[in-house]
Amino acid sequence: MSDEPPARGADGPDREANRLGRRVRRYAQVGAGVGGIAARAAATRLFGLDQADAKTARELKAALGGLKGPIMKVAQMLATIPDAVPAEFAAELSELQSSAPPMGWPFVKRRMRAEFGPGWEKRFASFEREAAAAASLGQVHRATSLDGEALAVKLQYPDMQSAVDADLKQLGMIFSIHRRMDRAIDTREIHAEIGERLREELDYQREAAHMRLYADIFRDDARIAVPRVFDDLSTKRLLTMNWLDGIPILSFRDHSLDERNRIAETMFAAWWTPFSSLGVIHGDPHLGNYSVRDDLGINLLDYGCIRIFPPSFVNGVVELYRALETDDRDRAAAAYENWGFGTLSNELVDVLNVWARFIYAPMLDNRVRSVADGISPGEYGRKEAFGVHKRLRELGPVTPPREFVFMDRAAIGLGSVFLHLGAELNFHRLFNEAIEGFDAVELDKRQKAALKKAGVPPVS
């Protein structure tokens, strides 16, 4: 199928018919592989977490592994949200990102020609045919600018808009099955949040604005490098930035504790500084989105999944920390209500506090420690999540605010990085330094100014 888009500004019945046709084909692709598995899952309550089957988990991975686009991205998300799927599913789905085969040179030529015209190669001194990296929504090629600078050129896969529409429909069906079997959590807001973020990830101009935002945040922190966007070599479906040399974080697992701690402390700053100062997080915790420089600084990569929170939500994060610090149930309840939790009984507040104490545990403990002593990266958070889920079945249904999807996902992902590194830090000191003097009104002013400067659409 050709990747060539209609002429700029073209619209009308033909274009809509083509998009509908692509959605129908996508339904068939996803449904054929996942439909039978989902039916068996419903029958055996796999999504209800009462029972899991390793064979079914492998079948689901195989069904999704050949598909590019959002359905694989969703699978990766579910693998990083504790208790969203059984452990067997999480283990299989977590491998999907690295198994995505790249598109070949014919696709690359079509995409580059569609974005820049037939003379596109003259814009580069060199352009490598083989992809340097491939993921769920696009792939990256190494290139060289006419001035001799090393570049990373990110190309979006074809028909991603149609794939998003089709795959979100499939996800809605899966969540609907889940709600009928397990009424602990109402997943409708989760579905809405995932859909909104996925649609944002298709807009590379928005991602370029996110990079400008992060570059400004860390302009005075030499430990954290953000790619520089080449606007004249970028479009809505193609993003060109300077190439940042680094090696995978996991390559440092056998290095000295001092080196591992330095990397972990920089990762803490890369995540918490944007959140506490501007209400922004890097919402994709996959280890491939970070690399380490020779000086042990961090390259922070891939800005498609950036979550911008209203200042009131950030204030709730700080308020809940203070409530847990002083064992103040009323203050905790107020923080949950501020986030949008409704009908909060004392019992429900206590259950929510179990999960909150797990998330905040390293920051509440004023000593040097690992993020979760004695817990393996693959099991991080699952025991606590299972206990909370069990109680919510009795007290629910609970509708988590949509902001929690990427807040929890990123927090667990960051914790997993610390576990992989075996880092030992005083997280209490680092966190309190980050929130010192926090003021929601001032954050609101800073956020509006920073988003406007970077060209990022304001938070809705």
Image: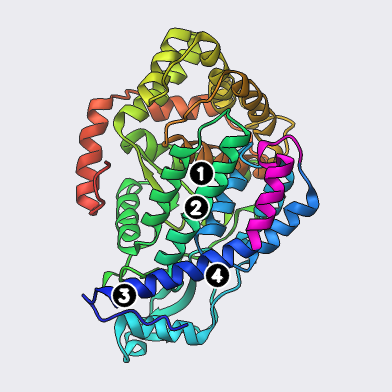
Q: Residue at x 35, y 21 (%)?
A: 338
Magenta range: 33-51
Q: Residue at x 35, y 58 (%)?
A: 207
Circles 2 and 1, Cβ within 8 Å, touching? The answer is yes
Q: Residue under circle 1?
A: 267
Residue 249 placed where, x, y %?
60, 53
The crowding category of the residue bearing disc 2, from other C-alpha atoms within 10 Å (few below 14, some 14 to 19, many at least 20), is many
User: The C terminus lies in which quarter of the figure?
Assistant: top left
Q: Residue under circle 4?
A: 133
Regarding residue 253, the answer to whether it shows in the image is no
Q: Main secondary structure of the magenta part?
A: helix
Residue 174 placed where, x, y %?
57, 47
In space, the residues marked 2 and 1 are separated at their CA atoms by 7 Å
Q: Residue at x 41, y 30 (%)?
A: 434
Q: Is residue 252 magenta?
A: no
The residue type indicated by label 2 comes to Ile
The residue type indicated by label 1 comes to Met
